[in-house]
Image (cartoon, grey):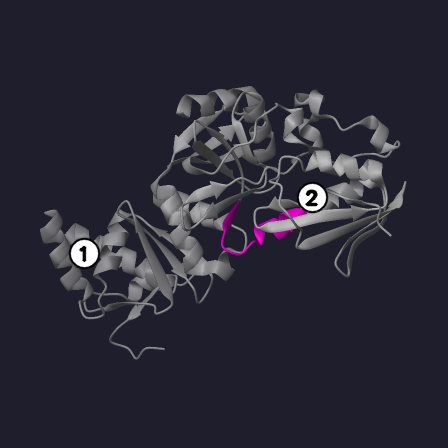
Amino acid sequence: MTDATGSIDGAFVPVRAAAVYTVEIDGEAVLLDEAHDRLHHLNPTAALLWSCFDGEATVEQLATETSEELRSSFATVYADTIAVVGDLVAQELVRDGREPGP
Amino acid sequence: MSTYTTVPRRAIGCCFAVELDDAELGAYLDGLFAALPRVDRADTTIGLTGARGCYTLAIGDETVLDDAELFAVVNRLVQRLNALATASPGFVCAHASGVARDGAAYVFPAHMESGKTTLAAGLVRAGFDYLTDEAVAFDPATVLIEPYPKPLSLDPGSWPLFPEAEPDPALRHGAALDQWQVPVAALRADAIGTPCPARFVVFPEYRADAVTEFVPMTRGEALVELARNTFAFNEQGRFALDALAEVVRGAECGRMTVGTLAAAIACIEELG
């Protein structure tokens, strides 16, 4: 499997894949990837980040806002954000908004 | 030419009847499907013709099974009925067994060989109402479960647990069985459930000699598992996902390792 995390830095702009339908439940999220007929479960941290992916905010901006909101250290939240985004990229649920869309 | 038509009945949304040329066999099928709701007329007619050792099963113009023993034909008939029932428009059907108590349903989604029929049979015998052993049909408009009280399809590993459910040997004509089709009345009289919401969604897994235990899971995890156990989920997509999300929002969810039937029944009774 490709290590998608390595290509993601603070300037990465997460954009949700177009064919993904989201259901939120108890702070978690279930994603239906209609392009690949796959289901994904996001824990509360990943679900919170997923809800913030607006195609404009960078990973660094998201980590800054989230760390302030959660009153957690930026370094920890930044590392978590990179990991979550990397995982979502690997599953073709997120792409980089700086690059042309499909 | 058929001489007997079974009472028209509804399997979720499929209204069916069986036409036969053997009245004794027809009466047997009427007993087998007696728990399903009676309807005025059938939209689907199933043909069962032949005699000992060489029966033919047909649905419309399609010959489903030919030159077969009686119980092989009956087993296939139940399987095809399941397929027709789970394709009923307007319902989201999970591959699950289900029982109810006090108007609240316990849903057990699982793949084959996980023990969901055995669990349902045991719970019905213990006093729960029977909803189904194969397909839990959710009505997205109401989030209620539409009962599908088909005959329970018991595999050989469960037969010693339910000796009272053995089919009439006179109908076997010496043929070997690979599954029992058991009308719920053989387990307990007046055991048919009514439409009700899911209160518990429990994913059972039978493991011989394991300690029986219930482990809670989040509703998000349960939603994914329930969707993966839903018939034609990909064809229904977000419609089904929304319906199932409403189901789990109203339910407690978890996994249950089943070591013995008695322990599993006790575990479920403790939940409620």
Q: Position of residue B227 (x, y in %)?
A: 46, 50
Mark 2 residue crowding within 10 angstroms, few (<14) / some (14–19) / many (20+):
some
Q: Is residue B23 above or below residue B124?
A: below
Q: Which quarter of the rendering shows the C terminus of chain A?
A: bottom left
Which numbered tag is attached to residue B78?
2
Q: Which residues are magenta?
A: B80-94
Which chain does the residue under circle 2 lie in? B
Q: Residue furthest bottom?
A: A100
What residue lies at 65% left-to-right and 27% top-to-bottom? B185
Which numbered tag is attached to residue A78?
1
Kind of residue at disc 1: Tyr
Instruction: Answer whether residue B209 is visible to the viewer in this image.
Output: no
B163 left or right of B243 in image: right
Q: Position of residue B87 (x, y in %)?
A: 58, 54
What residue lies at 36% left-to-right and 47% top-to-bottom? B246
Q: Position of residue B68 (x, y in %)?
A: 85, 46
Q: Judge by depth and name the residue closer to the eye, B150 or B41.
A: B41
Callout 1 touching callout 2 (CB < 8 Å): no
A6 left or right of A74 in image: right
User: What secondary structure is found at the residue carrying circle 1?
Assistant: helix
Residue B30 belongs to the span the image colors magenta: no
Kind of residue at disc 2: Val
Q: Position of residue B115 (x, y in %)?
A: 59, 33
B210 left or right of B243 in image: right
What residue lies at 54% left-to-right and 52% top-to-bottom? B231
